[in-house]
Amino acid sequence: MHISSTTSTTYKEAGDLLVVGIYQAPLREDPAFVALDAALGGALASEARACDFTGACGQQLQLAGGGALKVLRLVLVGLGAYCSKAAPCAATWLRLGGTATRLGNRFGARQVLLAQPQPPSKAAAVDLQLRAAQLARGVHLGAYAYRRYRTARARPHTVQKVVLLACDKASQASAATLRTAAVVAEGVALVRDLVNQPANDLYPKNFAQLCVRLAKAQKVACTVHQPPQLKKMGARLLLAVGEGSERPPCMVHLRYTPTAAASRRHGRGDGKPVVLVGKGITFDTGGLSLKAPDKMFGMKMDMGGAATVLASVLAAAKLQLPVPVHGILALAENMPSGHATRPGDIVASAAGKTVEINNTDAEGRLVLADALHLAGQQKARCIVDYATLTGACMVALGPTTAGLFANSDGLAADLLQAAGRTGEDFWRLPLTPALREQLQSEVADLRNTGEAWGGAITAALFLQEFV
């Protein structure tokens, strides 16, 4: 699918479908609504009154083209009340882009025109390239579907071209903006594919093989540490988690190094890498601390952190970022068997600290502990780990907000700002020192879980012991 951008204030571009986002405000004050109503000879205002369309979030108003419009169909999409804060706006633009693609495919459109939404006249200025980037990313993601295991014939994706209509030159998306949006969306699609893939088809060995193949295509260095190497590294926590499975664990180390040209464009810097660490439990039964059946279904997604790290490093390479980026993926399958690690076992970590495993279903922090130790040996600028680490975080924040823990206020601020600019919802949680006592073991340096209350915090406090 090709995305381009052009300026148009009169909506005279030709296409199969025109999608226009409308904020919830008096429609007569919306410049896009006024222009479209004029082009349709007043029919739009009449239809809006008849259907009680106000621009509320989720509302849609569909009309046939005609008059001065050179499109077969027009759809107005309600965006809700305008909010000048970055996060709500970015999420709104992202959804609008996805809606445009889905509407285009539903109506069999080949070319879709998507008008960049115009905020109310008194609203604060927005980052125009950010708006264009989020719309373009949404357009790509709106085409996503996972059909690898479907045998029935799917409805075809008809949309071949999307044109972003900007009201002026300043709002027109640059080629770099559209390129970045496409690369990021491609990375998101890769993560979705991997998370959707069932555990009988995705396990540590072939996950690592995929990393090798994709890394080679982008000239990213890739090392896979198999059990013999893990033993030499002292990564016994990762080995312990994978002990109960017939499929052995491994650790993948990806290394993107910018070209000299990329470094020169943005200054030489200090050469220190950003290191991303990902939890890659390809299936989590809980081990001998077995999950209930209704809690086990869906645990194929417990490798989402590792998938995110893989996609992020590949995106850095495709965009030729000026900063070195490493990715460390801790891959294992947590299964019960006669070889499985038992509650009460004591295992030494790669960092040398011993851990009493009092719950084998708290395995994510164990594999991350060894991966974080390797990350700390890379002389990193900073380390960020991504993990579907604990249901306690969802109990605290719900299913759409990610918990953020950090021992650096500056890094936390950067991550929260990045989340807002990309339409994600992060919330910083505290590293409460008083809860550290829950991780004290009578027979080892640490135990891997604390009490039920504050479970997400004690998980983060555990990880902090290894950086």
Image (cartoon, grey):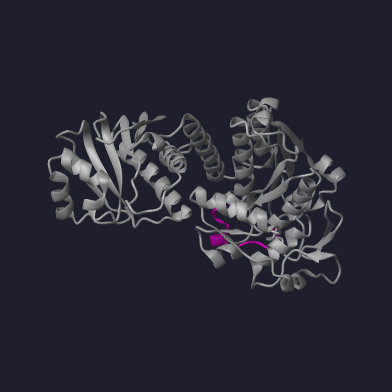
- In the figure, is residue 244 to the left or right of 67? right
- In the figure, is residue 448 to the left or right of 312? right
Q: Residue furthest front?
A: 122
Depth order, front residue of 257/399: 257
Q: Is residue 29 above or below residue 314?
A: below
Image quadrant where one finds the N terminus: top left
Q: Is residue 296 magenta?
A: yes
Q: How many marks?
A: 0
Residue at 72% from the left image edge and 37% from the top image edge: 269
Q: Is residue 293 magenta?
A: yes
Please tell me in which quadrant of the rendered image residue 307 appears: top right
Residue at 62% from the left image edge and 62% from the top image edge: 291
Depth order, front residue of 165/150: 165
Main SS class of the magenta portion in the image:
loop
- Answer whether residue 333 is visible to the viewer in this image: no
Please tell me in which quadrant of the rendered image residue 448 appears: bottom right
Q: Is residue 215 above or below residue 97?
A: above
Q: Is residue 354 above or below residue 233?
A: below
- Measuring from the top left, give residue 12's x and y in whole percent: 24, 31
Residue stretch in magenta? 287-299
- Answer whether residue 173 is visible to the viewer in this image: yes
- Measuring from the top left, give residue 186's x and y in whole percent: 52, 36
Residue at 17% from the left image edge and 33% from the top image edge: 68
- In the figure, is residue 54 to the left or right of 145? left
- Measuring from the top left, give residue 422's x and y in whole percent: 50, 47
Residue at 55% from the left image edge and 63% from the top image edge: 394
- Measuring from the top left, give residue 388's x and y in whole percent: 61, 54
Image quadrant where one finds the C terminus: bottom right
